Amino acid sequence: MLVGTAFSPYLIDAIIGLSIVYKALDSMRAYQRWFRYQPNTKAATLIFGLFHGFGLATKIQEFDISSDGLIPNLLAFNVGMEIGQILALRGILIAISYWRRTDNFWRHAYTANVAVMSAGFMLIGYQLNGYATS
Amino acid sequence: MYNTDNPPRDELLSAKQLHRSKSIAACVAAVLLFTTILPAEYGTDPTGSAA
């Protein structure tokens, strides 16, 4: 099953870093300033979601799961991941909703997005270095 | 799903400010990468400070 699909996890993770930079710039309204255009969040989520899923898949391949009970294991992994995301996002959404109501939200969010973008650049550099040396 | 609203153009930051923010983000990332992340993750020593 898809055993031949061995795409470099480093490159996938570099693309994930790129998606972090993309989203930070999106939240900073950079595309509206540069291109007078707001990219569709749904489309961006779908495209980058595919890469993120691909990244998870390359990670799972490294686990070398036994083929005995592979499908239930994969399903359980995915369901567990979704539950974990819902649990985390529940708290994050509440916290950010309060943050949004503060007076200087836009300024603080802008600064936070610069930090997020920097973290994205770091992830890209980290992964590209891994790809270059692997 | 919520798609970002388009604020009036005068509320957007200028391209100059964006460029400044982007440069700061890239510089911080580069410094941390070469001084901390790459040495920690790959055991390399790009700055030569461990010699």
Image (spheres, coloured by chain):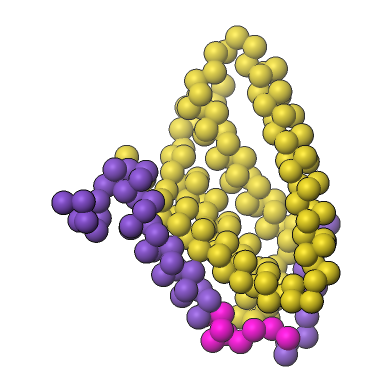
Location of residue A41 (image quadrant):
bottom right
Q: What's the residue at 38%, 57% (across, down)?
A: B33
- Which lettered chain is shown in yellow? A
- Which lettered chain is shown in purple? B
| Residue B21 placement, left or right of A95 | left
Q: Residue furthest left?
A: B51
Q: Position of residue A55 (x, y in %)?
A: 55, 40
Q: Residue furthest bottom?
A: B10
Nearest the viewer among A37 and A89 is A89
Q: Can residue A20 be seen from the camera position used here?
A: yes
Location of residue A105 (image quadrant):
bottom right
| Residue B36 placement, left or right of A88 | left
Q: Residue furthest top?
A: A68
Q: Quadrant of the C terminus of chain A?
A: top left
Q: Quadrant of the N terminus of chain A?
A: top right
Nearest the viewer among B20 and A78 is B20
Q: Position of residue A81 (x, y in %)?
A: 70, 34
Q: What's the residue at 57%, 39% (across, down)?
A: A54
* In the image, residue A55 above or below residue B21: above
Q: What's the residue at 77%, 59% (across, down)?
A: A96
* In the image, residue A129 above or below residue A32: above
Residues drawn in magenta? B11-19
Q: Say if the magenta span includes residue B13.
A: yes
* In the image, residue A81 above or below residue B42: above
Q: Position of residue A30 (x, y in %)?
A: 62, 75
Q: Can residue A132 be seen from the camera position used here?
A: no
Q: Position of residue A57 (x, y in %)?
A: 57, 33
Q: What's the residue at 51%, 24% (across, down)?
A: A63
